[in-house]
C-alpha cells in the first residue's frame, strides 16, 4: 500500500513515529512532497525557536530512511485539481502523481471522498490505518508503541504510559486495541 502523509500527521512526533514505524513493519510505502515537508518544518516553529531546527533534522532522517518517498509533479497537475481548501491541492497532487492508494490525514472535510475517488485515491485517518496495521502485526505494533513511549519519556523528561500517550496523540482506537 502506498500513502501520502499530510503535514498534520507528520508534525506530531508520536503520530509520525507510529505511522513511519508501522510502514517499516508492514512494508507500506509512505510518500510526501517537498512542500509537505516544508509545511512540517514551518509548523514546528510553534513549539519554540529550536522546533524548526529539530523538524529539519527529523526531515533529513526521514529522507534518508525513505529515499524514494519524495514526490514531484508538473504544475499543470495541481492546477487542474479541486479541493474545498485550495491550499491542500498539493497533497492530492502528490497522491495522484505517485499513484498512492491513500492520503493519511486528520482533515477529512478538506478531502471529500467523491473528489478523491475521481482521482483514484481515498483518505484514511491515522488511527484507523494504525489499527489495520495492528490487526495484521499485533506483536510488532505493540513493540513499536512501547519504543515510541520510551522515546517520548526520554525526550520529554516526563514518565509516559503507552495508552495515555497514544490517546494524547489522537490515536484512541489504537490505544484501545493495545489495552
Image (cartoon, rainbow, N blue to C red):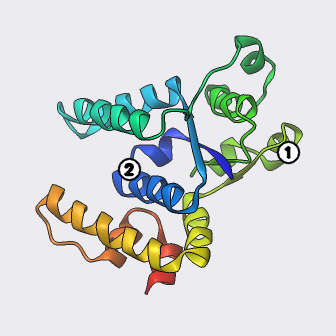
Tell me what residue is drawn at x 71 percent, y 41 percent: 100
Tell me what residue is drawn at x 74 percent, y 47 percent: 101
Horizontal side of 162 relative to 7 (left or right) equals: left
Judged from the image, the secondary structure of the residue bearing numbered disc 1 is helix
Q: Which of 67 and 171 is in front in this view?
A: 67
Position of residue 6 measured from the top left corner of the image (x, y, whole percent): 55, 41
Looking at the rendering, which quadrant does residue 73 occupy? top right
Tell me what residue is drawn at x 66 percent, y 51 percent: 108
Looking at the rendering, which quadrant does residue 76 occupy? top right
Q: Given contact means CB atoms under 8 Å apart, are the residues at marks 1 and 2 in contact? A: no
Q: Residue furthest right?
A: 118
Dot 2 corresponds to which residue? Answer: 12
The image quadrant where one finds the C terminus is bottom left
Position of residue 79 measured from the top left corner of the image (x, y, whole percent): 75, 16
Looking at the rendering, which quadrant does residue 53 occupy? top left
Horizontal side of 102 relative to 170 (left or right) equals: right
Q: How far apart are marks 1 and 2 (CA)?
A: 27 Å
Residue 117: which disc? 1
Q: Which of 104 and 29 is in front in this view?
A: 29
Horizontal side of 127 relative to 3 (left or right) equals: left
Q: Earlier in the sequence, mark 1 or mark 2?
A: 2
Dot 2 alpha-carbon crowd within 10 angstroms: few under 14, some 14 to 19, many 20 or more:
some
How many numbered marks, from 0 up? 2
Q: Which of 57 and 126 is in front in this view?
A: 57
Q: Residue furthest left?
A: 157
Horizontal side of 72 relative to 14 (left or right) equals: right
Position of residue 25 measured from the top left corner of the image (x, y, whole percent): 50, 62
Would you say residue 99 is visible in this rendering?
A: yes
Position of residue 137 measured from the top left corner of the image (x, y, whole percent): 55, 74
Dot 1 alpha-carbon crowd within 10 angstroms: few under 14, some 14 to 19, many 20 or more:
few
Amino acid at each position: 500500500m502506498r500513502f501520502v502523509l499530510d503535514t498534520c500527521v507528520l508534525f506530531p512526533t508520536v503520530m509520525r513515529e507510529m505511522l513511519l514505524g508501522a510502514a517499516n513493519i508492514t512494508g507500506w510505502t509512505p510518500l510526501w512532497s517537498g512542500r509537505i515537508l516544508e509545511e512540517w518544518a514551518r509548523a514546528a516553529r510553534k513549539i519554540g525557536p529550536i522546533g524548526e531546527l529539530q523538524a529539519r533534522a527529523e526531515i533529513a532522517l526521514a529522507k534518508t530512511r525513505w529515499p524514494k518517498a519524495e514526490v514531484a509533479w508538473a504544475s499543470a497537475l495541481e492546477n487542474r485539481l479541486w479541493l474545498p481548501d485550495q491550499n491542500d491541492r498539493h497533497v492530492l497532487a502528490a497522491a495522484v502523481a505517485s499513484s498512492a492508494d491513500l492520503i493519511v490525514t486528520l482533515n477529512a472535510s478538506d478531502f471529500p471522498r467523491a473528489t478523491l475517488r475521481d482521482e483514484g485515491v481515498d483518505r484514511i485517518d491515522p488511527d484507523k490505518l494504525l489499527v489495520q496495521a495492528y490487526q495484521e502485526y499485533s506483536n510488532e505494533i505493540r513493540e513499536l508503541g512501547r519504543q515510541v513511549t520510551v522515546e517520548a519519556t526520554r525526550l520529554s523528561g516526563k514518565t509516559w504510559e503507552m495508552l495515555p500517550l497514544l490517546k494524547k496523540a489522537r490515536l484512541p482506537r489504537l490505544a484501545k486495541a493495545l489495552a
